[in-house]
Amino acid sequence: MASMKLGSKTDGFHRDGNTWYCTTGLPSDVTIEVGEMTFNLHKFPLLSRSGLLEKLIEELSIEDGSVCVLKLNDMPAGAKAFELIARFCYGIKIEMTSLNVVSLRCAAEYLRMTEDYGEGNLIVQAEAFLDEVFGSWTDSIKALETCEEVLPYAEEIHIVPRCIDSLAMKACADPNVFNLPVAGQTDAQSQRDVILWNGISSSANKPQPISDDWWFQDVSFLNLPLYKRLILAVESRGMKPETISASLIYYAKRYLPLMSRQSSFDHANNGNPWATVSIPSETDQRVLLEEIVTLLPKKKGVTSPEFLIMLLRTAMVLHASPSCIENLEKKAGAQLDQAVLVDLLIPNVGYSVETLYDIDCAQRMLDHFMSLNQDAALSTPPCIVEEGQFLGGPDTLQPLTMVASLVDGFLAEVAPDVNLKPSKFETLAATIPDYARPLDDGVYHAIDVYLKGSCNMLGL
C-alpha cells in the first residue's frame, strides 16, 4: 500500500478520554470541538495553515485572553481526520495512505488549507499523493471505498470520478500486457512476477495468462451506486459486453442470497467470497436486482438464459417492479432456444397460486420467442419429406425445433398438476406451429400424462 510521511517532529499530542492535548508546554488558547472529541490547541499553528480556522478564530477571539472555543460539526471524516490535520499543522509526522488520503483531502478543502497559508500545504500534498494512488489498482480501490464516508465532499472535488476513471482504464487494459494485480494478490507480489520495460511486461517466469475476470472480486466490495458508475465507465471505454455481463453476475450472486442458492457457482479456487457478506434487506435486494437488470448488456446471447431466469425467479420472490419482470421475461424469451427444461420450472409465487409452476410466465416467454422467430421461419416454409425430416430452411427452423422440444418436455413435467386448466395446457402446446415439430412423440406424451392425471383426479 502506498504511503507518504509528512512532518518532521515525532509527537506532541496525547489523549485523555475524549480530549486531545498538545504537549508543547504552552497553555492552550483555542479549543476545537469535533463531534464528541475536544482538541485543546494553539491558535498560531492552526491559522497559519487553514483559511477557515483563521476566519473563525478572528471572529471569536476575545481580548480578555480567555480560550476561544470553535465547533466543527461539519468536519469531513470527523475527529479522526482532524487529529491528523492538527498534527500536520504542528509539523508532527503523519502518514498519508490510500485509506486516509481521501478524508484528508476533503478535510483540507473544508478547512481551506491552500498555498496561501504556507507552501506545501495539505491540499497540494494530498493531491500529489492521490496521483500516486491512481497509478495503482489496489490503492485506487481502497481510496474509492473510503469515498463513501465523505461522499458529498469527495464528489465536489472530483475524487470519485477520478477514482472510477482510474479503475475503468485499468479494468479495460490487458492484464497480461500491463502490470495489473490479480484478485488476492498485492501490488508488491505482482511487481515481483514481472519485469517492466517502458510499461510492457517481459515475464521472467512466464506467469499464467490472466483471465478477464481478474477484477470482479475487488469491485464487488463497492456499494451499488459506485459499482454502477464503474460498470457504465468500463462500458463507455468499450469493454466486451460478455465481460460486463460476467461482472454483473458475480456482483448479483454476492448480494442476492436467492441467486447463490440457485447457482452451482464453484468457489473452490478462492474459498467462498460470500462467506462474510452481510445479507441486505429485502428492499435493498430488490433495488439492487432492478439496477442489475438495467445494466445488463442489450446484445442478445451475451447473458445466458440460465442466469436471466435465475434473476427472474429472484425478482418474483422480491416482488420487483412489473417492468423489471417483463424486461427479464423478454430477455430470457429471446434466448429460449438456449434454455433447458429446469430453467422453465419457475415456482409459482403469486398471491393466488393455482399451479406448482408458473405456467403464465412460461407462456409469456414463449410468446416473445415466437414473435421474434416465427416471421423468419415463415419466410422459408419447410417441406416435410417424411416424418422427422425437413427439406429447406433447416438453419432457420433449428431454434424453433429446439424450443418445440423444450416446450413438450415442460408440458410433460407440469401435466400431472391437477390445477392445470385444459385451456392453458392447450394454449401452450398450440403456440408451437406443427411444422416446428419434426416428431410429435413429445407432445403426445405430454397429452397422455395430462389425460391420465385428469382421469385419476376424477377417479376414473
Image (cartoon, grey):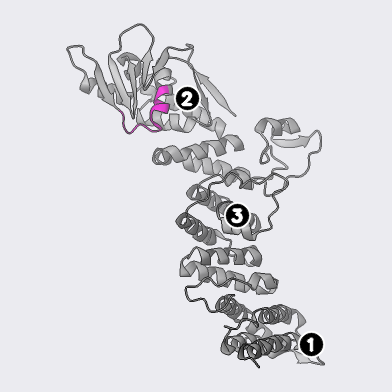
Residue type for callout 3: Lys
Q: Residue furthest top?
A: 25
Compare marks 1 and 2 and give the one earlier in the sequence.
2
Q: In the rendering, at what x and y percent does residue 424 appear? A: 57, 86
Compare marks 1 and 3 and give the one earlier in the sequence.
3
Neighbourhood count class around disc 1 (C-alpha, 10 Å): few under 14, some 14–19, many 20 upward: some
Q: In the rendering, at what x and y percent does residue 13 appear? A: 41, 14
Q: Which mark is residue 125?
A: 2
The residues colored magenta run 72-83
Residue under label 3: 253
Task: Name above or below for residue 452 compared with residue 109.
Answer: below
Q: Are marks 3 and 2 in contact (CB under 8 Å)?
A: no
Name the front one of labels 1 and 3.
3
Residue type for callout 1: Phe
Please check the rendered image and state whether residue 235 is part of the magenta-colored stretch, yes or no.
no
Residue under label 1: 390
Task: Name above or below for residue 156 compared with residue 394.
Answer: above
Q: Secondary structure at mark 3?
A: helix
